[in-house]
Amino acid sequence: MALPATTPYTIDDIYALPEGERAELIDGQMYMMAPPSRKHQEIASELFTGISSYIKSKGGSCKSYFAPFAVFLNEDDKNYVEPDISVVCDKSKLTDKGCSGAPDWIIEIVSPGSRRMDYFIKLFKYRTAGVREYWIVDPEKNRITVYNFESEDTGDYTFADSVKVGIFDDLSIDFGKITF
């Protein structure tokens, strides 16, 4: 849910939130975040574990992070998101606070309150910020929507499918093996 603003919010407003409250900031508009459900956390955990294990097994230079992980999308003070999973391959973007600039791959797991954000607002924001690949995992609709912005491909999959990761040559995620 967006909070009304008479002046644009900044990252200072995010850091001033009371302990335990989380929000994202897109173009100076603050969006409060509800705690994730158990199913949401189980899906995120399985995806993160698989991605991290793959990167480690390949000796890759990319790093994977799970929410809450600060992403300062446009390297300004008006855009701050906490994707469910972020993969960053350019280590120069990593700071003690999080990621300054666009991660290479972002996965968002849709919650009832985040549907509009994930499918519309973040889709546009991630694409224009330079994210290479964006996955929307929607447990309610049994759907995974994959946007590969580099090749301009889009794909729709179900939780019975194995989904090829575009930024890695030999990684696919078998959603049929994800238990929740």
Image: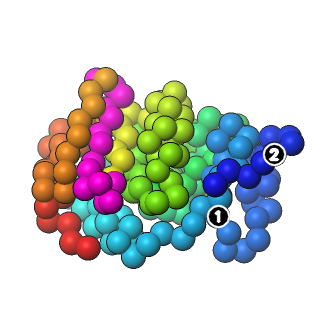
Quarter the C terminus occupies: bottom left
Name the residue at 29% across, 54% down: 141
Q: Residues within 10 Å of mark 2 (few under 14, many from 20)?
A: few
Residue 87 seen in this snapshot:
no
Residue 30's x, y, as percent? Answer: 70, 50
State the scheme by which the image is colored.
rainbow
Q: Quadrant of the N terminus?
A: bottom right
Q: Residue at x 62, y 35 (%)?
A: 74
Query: Where are the magenta residues, as a range?
Result: 138-151
Which residue is at the front of the view, 95 or 25?
Answer: 25
- The vertical placement of 178 against 31, above or below, is below
- What whole-number distance in Å separates the C-alpha atoms at marks 2 and 1? 17 Å
Q: Which residue is mark 1?
A: 22
Looking at the rendered structure, the kind of residue marked 1 is Arg
Q: Is residue 141 magenta?
A: yes
Give the residue pinned by disc 2: 5
Of marks 2 and 1, which one's residue comes earlier in the chain? 2
